[in-house]
Amino acid sequence: MPAGVRRLIAVKALPGAMPDASTRAPVARTRRALAVATVLACAALLSAGTQAAAQAPAGPRTLAIEGRVARVLDGDSLLVIVADNGVRGVRLAGIDAPEKGQPHADAARRALLEQLHERDVRVDVVKTDAFGRLVGRVFAANRDVGLAQLRHGLAWHFTRYDADLAPAVRRRYAHAERQAKLRGIGLWRDAAPVPPWEHRAAQRRGAASDRALQPDD
């Protein structure tokens, strides 16, 4: 018998060298179980990813209305003539311009006036505020006028109300404010411009103090 054949027979005769039927069956079952577990794990990951995408915030729901600008009140609010709905006050969503009496308030109003004077506009309304004004992004010739105010350094990105903006819009507004700061234009020429919400809060505190000092009748 050739030596190669004798070695093969010897190897086959070694205990455990070749699995018998009783050994192969558990191995096969283990492999099938691992394959099934892998498929289930992949399916779970895909499902989780789909659910996360479905639950990701897509931004607020909006109602688009069209009208013609009747008057620009300041750097972030205006009056719009809406068909079948009269004149409505509109507050630009996502920005806060200097209040009357603050530095750059007149410049902010003039800049908005240049964009909107007697122009046809679209307002993507997200809500009505406590003063009955429509709050939304305003577009003139498909141009976001609130974003333009930020780019010119004539308003702050009003992060307190970021929920009024879609995530992508929030990023654009934040970027526009950062760029205006870096360029030192508009209100960012000042060393420490006071945000309008702080100005309003100070006015409210002053008014409350004045009322407290008034003598009782």
Image (cartoon, rainbow, N blue to C red):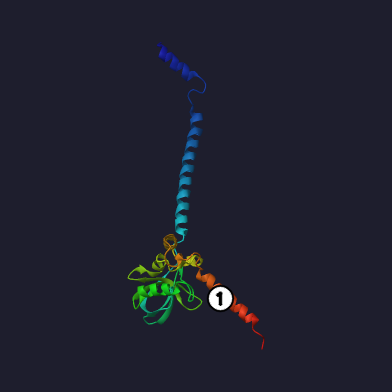
Query: How many numbered marks have been drawn onto this rendered protein structure?
Result: 1
- Dot 1, how many residues are within 10 Å of its Cα: few (below 14), some (14-19), or many (20+)? few
Which image quarter holds the N terminus?
top left
Q: Image height check: is 42 above or below 90?
A: above
Q: Image height check: is 45 above or below 145?
A: above
Is residue 83 or residue 5 the one in the foreground? Answer: 83
Is residue 165 or residue 18 the one in the foreground? Answer: 165
Residue displayed at 62% across by 78% down: 209
Residue displayed at 48% across by 52% down: 48
Q: Is residue 142 left or right of residue 6?
A: left
Residue 15 in percent (x, y) is at 52, 21
Residue 47 in percent (x, y) is at 46, 52
- Secondary structure at numbered mark 1: helix
Say which quarter of the image contains residue 61.
bottom left
Residue 119 in percent (x, y) is at 34, 76
Say which residue label 1 marks. Answer: 203
Question: Residue lying furthest top in this view?
Answer: 1
Question: Residue lying furthest right in this view?
Answer: 216
Residue 144 in percent (x, y) is at 38, 68
Amino acid type of the residue that numbered disc 1 sits on in the rendered structure: Gln
Which image quarter holds the C terminus?
bottom right
Is residue 114 or residue 160 the one in the foreground? Answer: 114
Residue displayed at 45% across by 56% down: 53
